[in-house]
Image: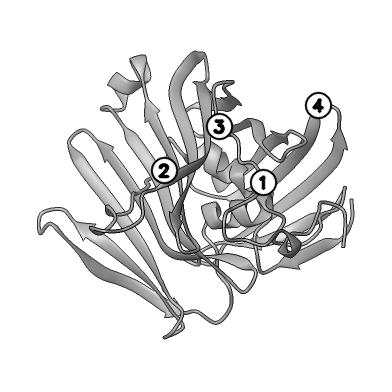
Amino acid sequence: MAPLRPLRLKSRSVIIWLLCWGVLSQAGILPPLKAGAAPKALLEDLKYRIDFWILEDAARGRLTLKSLGSGRYQAELSGEAQGILGLLSGGRRDSYQTEMIYDHGRLRPVVYREESRRRGKHYLKEYRFDYSKKRLELWQLKERQGNLVLKWHTKLKEAIYDPLSAFYNGRLGLLGPIKDGDTYQITGIPYPAPETIEVSLGQQTQEGRQVMVALVNAAFEDKKGLVFILFNGEGVPTLAWTRVLGFGKISGKLLPDGKYLENGLPGIPSESRVPEGGE
C-alpha cells in the first residue's frame, strides 16, 4: 500500500459513505426553483436495493444528478425504508442534497442539506457556503418554530466539499489522477468535530475496483467502521457493504433500470477532466 496522501478534495470513493449512511442518517432537500428558472434536466439516476442483516430489499436508495442551467447542478441521494423495516422505523425517509456551481475547474457546493422524516418528526440541517465572506454556516430547523436558526459557523479557509459534490468531482475526473494502491486522507465538514476519512484504492480488475474506507461515526461499533465498495469501469458504484451498530451487515446493490451519466456535464469543458491514472 502506498503512503498516505492528504487531499483537500475528496476522492470519488466517498460514495461509499453516502450509500451506507443514506438510509440511516439525517438528510435534506433543497427548496424548489424560483419562478422562471430553467427546468431541471436529469443527467444521472442510479437506483439501489439495500439489504439489512437478514432482511432483503429492506430499503431503496436513489442517487440523482440534475442540471439547473448556467453551470449549476443538483445532486441528491435519498433512501426510504420499506416493508417490515419501514414499520419498525416509523416510515423513515432520508435524503442528502447539494446544489453546486462549476467554478475554477471544480464543482463547488453552495448549499448542502440533510433531512430526515420519521414518526411524524422532521429533522433538517442546512450548510451554507458563503465564498464571498469565506464563511461556512450550519442552520438547523426548529420544528416548533417552523424556521431555521443559525447553530454553528466557521471560517472557510480552504476548499470544503460535502460528500455529494466530492463524489461528482471525482466521478468527472476533476480531482486529478488516481493510482492503484494509494491511500488518501479526506477531510469532511468539520462539525460537530474535525473528521478524517481514509480511502484505500484497490486495483482495477474485470469485476471493477474495490475501495475500502475507514471512518469514525457513532453508527459503527466502537464508533469506527470499514466500508467497502465496488466501482465498475465507468466509475459507477455497483455494490457497497459494511457493518453498523444495531443492524449488523448492510449492503447496497445497483439495480439495472438506471440512467448513467454520459459525456460529462453540460457547461464543463472536456479538457478540464483528468483521466484515471493519467496526468
Residue plotted at (39% across, 42% down): 95
Position of residue 224 in the picture relative to residue 142 (left or right): right
Foreground disc of the pair 1, 4? 1
Residue count near mark 1 (Cα–Cα under 10 Å), binned few <14, some 14–19, many ≥20: few
Of marks 1 and 2, the one in the foreground: 1
Secondary structure beneath label 4 = loop
The residue singled out by tag 1 in the image is 263
Residue type of the residue flagged with mark 4 = Glu
Position of 32 relative to 253 (above/below): below
Q: Nearer the viewer, residue 63 or 41?
A: 41
Q: Residues within 10 Å of mark 2 (few under 14, many from 20)?
A: some
Q: What residue is pinned by disc 3?
A: 259
Kind of residue at badge 1 = Asn
Would you name the residue on which mark 4 appears?
A: 207
The outermost residue toward the bottom is 133
Per the rendering, the mark at residue 25 is: 2
Whole-angstrom CA distance, mark 4 to mark 2, is 30 Å
Q: Earlier in the sequence, mark 4 or mark 2?
A: 2
Label 3 secondary element: loop
Residue density around tag 3, few if under 14, some if 14–19, many if 20 or more, within 10 Å: few
Q: Indicate the quadrant where residue 60 lies.
A: top left
Q: Residue at x 52, y 49 (%)?
A: 217
First in sequence: mark 4 vs mark 3? 4
In the rendering, at what x and y percent does residue 103 appear? 57, 71
Q: Which label's residue is closer to the chain start, 1 or 2?
A: 2
Q: Mark 1 falls on what kind of element?
A: loop
From the top left corner, tell me how far across and down residue 246 is, in percent: 46, 30
Whichever of callouts 1 and 4 sits on the residue coming sooner in the sequence is: 4
Asked whether residue 81 is in view, the answer is yes
Helix, strand or loop status at disc 2 = loop
